Amino acid sequence: MVQTDLKPTLTSLSDFDLKTYLQTKKELVEKALDESLTIEKPEKIYEAMRYSLLAGGKRLRPILCLATAELLSQNEVIAMPTACALEMIHTMSLIHDDLPAMDNDNYRRGRLTNHKVYGEDIAILAGDGLLAYAFEYVAENTKNIPTERIVKVLGILAKAVGANGLVGGQVMDLDCEGKSDVTAETLTSIHRKKTGALLEACVSCGAVLSGASIDDLTRLSIYAQNIGLAFQIIDDILDVTATTEELGKTAGKDISSQKATYPKLWGIQTSQTKAEELVNDAITQLSVYGKKALPLQAIAQYIVKRKN
Amino acid sequence: MVQTDLKPTLTSLSDFDLKTYLQTKKELVEKALDESLTIEKPEKIYEAMRYSLLAGGKRLRPILCLATAELLSQNEVIAMPTACALEMIHTMSLIHDDLPAMDNDNYRRGRLTNHKVYGEDIAILAGDGLLAYAFEYVAENTKNIPTERIVKVLGILAKAVGANGLVGGQVMDLDCEGKSDVTAETLTSIHRKKTGALLEACVSCGAVLSGASIDDLTRLSIYAQNIGLAFQIIDDILDVTATTEELGKTAGKDISSQKATYPKLWGIQTSQTKAEELVNDAITQLSVYGKKALPLQAIAQYIVKRKN
């Protein structure tokens, strides 16, 4: 049955206007993020939090969450607080990763990093504040769904950040810096935690909020794991092939910091092929949903085609 | 009615064996904390998290949560995951506050601070990991109570950490360092956020988990705000009067760092009197509960009598 569905889905996939879709959703998310965090006293910390939270970016994580909720329940409104929380968490991880004690980066999304503007102390606290606020925002603003789903979502979000997610991935990443003997297996394990866990949380949360079945959750998890890994492979490729201007962050940094990357392990061509395979698998996973899955499938395809 | 209740309560208060009570609860909490966080891969981050989480201390925050649950529902078991989460959050705030970019402290609870042992990068991540894990632990381990209470507790915990709680208090504190014109009002506002918010969360969470009424919550909030402020006043006094050995952290630091403190604003004697008044008010708030309130009342009294 998956096979018969596959062809028409893929035909319509090429017709799907992803650019307009992403633009529309991005505007919705930007507005919701702007409204989610107003400036109170002490102003400095709210300003620092807003500086990084509203610094643009693709808003891919919230969009994945909204698109999943739309796919399963035709109701993206219920998922907006969680979508915002996912971006808060992602922003926190960027602020802390950029710190001098970590990756020591001066630019992010084309602007100075948080600690370069507000100082290291405030940057650390802005990250802490955003992380805490993500949970507060979901707990206080998710309406009209059974509360057990909210508890489940809060658990998924927290797990994606913790020592088995973002935090653990960053630890492994720091550990591997300068090492020449990092295997593809270790590299994949790093990325599954550092990038994959939160991307998977985006679709899992959207699914749980919509009352997904176990089958839905399994399909969507595989989809997310595949696009997460593909995303990272393409990131590694772009670090070699794109300019700092195109990326909005320092290009060529992986080479200068002797970081293990897929292009180094496999070469650029094999890395690209592997990313494409992962994305095709992700698209096939969702073919059972027919045309409703087009946004998520188009997002998967976009990941291997993007230029930044 | 409060007046007639007051006398017998206070008589029994002097008989209450707080030392045994605190010791028993502390052992329960230590065991629960030890079991809450087992070492997985990557080991380094779990070890860093456990290093600070299991570094001893009074465990006052989890005990306040358990004691409140016991007072209102005679069921402290339902509150143990939240009690552990409160200590995880408290530990996170200590790890981050001790960082070179913040208070730059080398000792905490009589041991080297987290970044002195594991490095700044891991210390930042250990804090992040503990903060995230606090929410995960409550969401996944709180059993046998209505889920709306769990959502409410997660919201309270998050709010206590954020820009209007711990994080905001630390920002204001850093801002006031070296300033000679800090008023008692500003100092109290700092402490209400930096210490008070989490202490209030301890009793509020214990109360919400127990299905507290609005009246219960109001009384317990006043109790917590009072003991929070008294706790801070005594902390300031001890910084002047106690030794580094007694405190387990660097004594006299407030003077050397030109920090605003109550003894500097009011003198030691007036500060002590003010702390005692706050504690007496806190004790009176709970007299309506009769003997069941003895543990919380004795804890309040202990705060002004402690030596570290």
Image (cartoon, coloured by chain):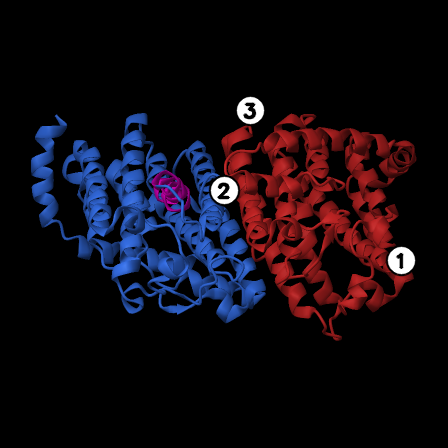
Chain colours: A blue, B red
Of B183 and A120, the residue lying toward us: A120
Residue at label 2? Answer: A162
Tell me if mark 1 has few (under 14), some (14-19) or many (20+) residues whose alpha carbon lies within 10 angstroms of its own.
few
Upstream in the sequence, badge 3 or badge 1?
3
Which chain letter matches label 2? Answer: A
The quadrant holding residue B239 is bottom right
Q: Residue A274, how many percent across, how many down?
A: 22, 42
Indicate yes or no whether the magenta region holds residue A187: yes
Closer to the camera: disc 3 or disc 2? 2
Q: Residue at x 46, y 60 (%)?
A: A98
For the C terminus of chain A, give its image quadrant: bottom left
Q: Count residues near mark 2 (Cα–Cα under 10 Å), then give few for <14, some for 14-19, many for 20+.
A: many
Residue A27 in sight in this render:
no
The x, y position of residue B19, in whole percent, is 85, 34
Which amino acid, by three-letter code, is at mark 1?
Thr
Work out whether disc 3 and disc 1 sit on a shared chain.
yes
Quarter placement of the N terminus of chain A: top left
Q: Which residues are magenta?
A: A184-201
Q: Position of residue A83 (x, y in %)?
A: 37, 48
Question: Foreground residue, A91 or B71?
Answer: A91
Chain name for mark 3: B
- In-image side of B277 versus A80 (left or right): right
When the figure is inspected, residue A243 is found, relative to residue B161, above or below; the finding is below
Residue on which the image places disc 1: B241
Chain of residue at mark 1: B
Q: Which residue is mark 3?
A: B144
